[in-house]
Image (tube, grey):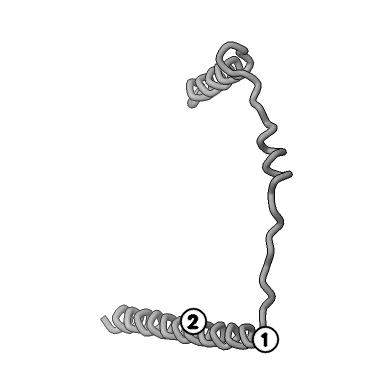
């Protein structure tokens, strides 16, 4: 019965935690009115309108970033192929 002690400890801990939550002396009912007060007093978010100039600038930035990422991935793939090829040559020639 491997693991029975761990299972028994888990059940015991669960029972002890449940008894703590039911105890009226140490835990009172939690006041949940702060949640509804926060929801009522919350202000709606206001988002700025994007201008066409900003969108064009953002498009250029994202295109440049995408090109850098593609170049970096191609370099990494070529380096990986080179190292793999060297290992294959070393394995078959030795």
Decide: is 22 above or below 61.
Answer: above
- In front of the other: 37 or 83: 37
Residue 87 to residue 45: above or below: below
- Residue 84: horizontal and vertical position, in percent? 37, 79
Residue 69 is tagged as: 2
Vertical placement of residue 22 versus 68, above or below: above
The crowding category of the residue bearing disc 2, from other C-alpha atoms within 10 Å (few below 14, some 14 to 19, many at least 20), is: few
Q: Nearer the viewer, residue 28 or 45?
A: 45
Residue plotted at (69% across, 49% down): 42
Direction from residue 79 to residue 8 in the image, left or right? right
Quadrant (top left/top right/bottom left/bottom right) for the C terminus: bottom left
Name the side, left or right, on which 45 lies relative to 89. right
Q: Nearer the viewer, mark 1 or mark 2?
A: 1
85 left or right of 49 in image: left
Residue 10 rendering spot, x and y as whole percentages: 53, 23
Which of 19 and 76 lies nearest the eye of the viewer? 19
Which residue matches tag 1?
Answer: 52
User: For residue 89, which quarter of the picture?
Assistant: bottom left
Residue found at the far left of this picture: 94
Quarter of image, res 32: top right
Q: Which mark is residue 60?
A: none
Query: Which residue is at a point 69% across and 64% down the rendered structure image?
Result: 46
Mark positioned earlier in the residue sequence (1 or 2): 1
Q: Position of residue 30 (x, y in %)?
A: 64, 25
Residue pictured at 46% horizontal, 86% vertical: 71
Alpha carbon distance from label 1 to label 2: 26 Å
SS class of the residue under badge 2? helix
Circle 1 — which element? helix
């Amino acid at each position: 019965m491997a693991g029975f002690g761990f299972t028994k400890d888990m059940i015991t801990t669960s029972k002890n935690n449940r008894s703590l939550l039911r105890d009226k002396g140490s835990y009172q009912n939690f006041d949940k009115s702060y949640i509804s007060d926060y929801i009522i007093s919350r202000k709606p978010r206001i988002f700025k309108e994007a201008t066409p100039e900003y969108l064009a600038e953002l498009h250029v930035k994202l295109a440049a970033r995408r090109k850098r990422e593609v170049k970096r991935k191609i370099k990494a793939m070529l380096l990986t192929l080179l190292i793999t090829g060297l290992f294959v040559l070393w394995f078959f020639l030795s």
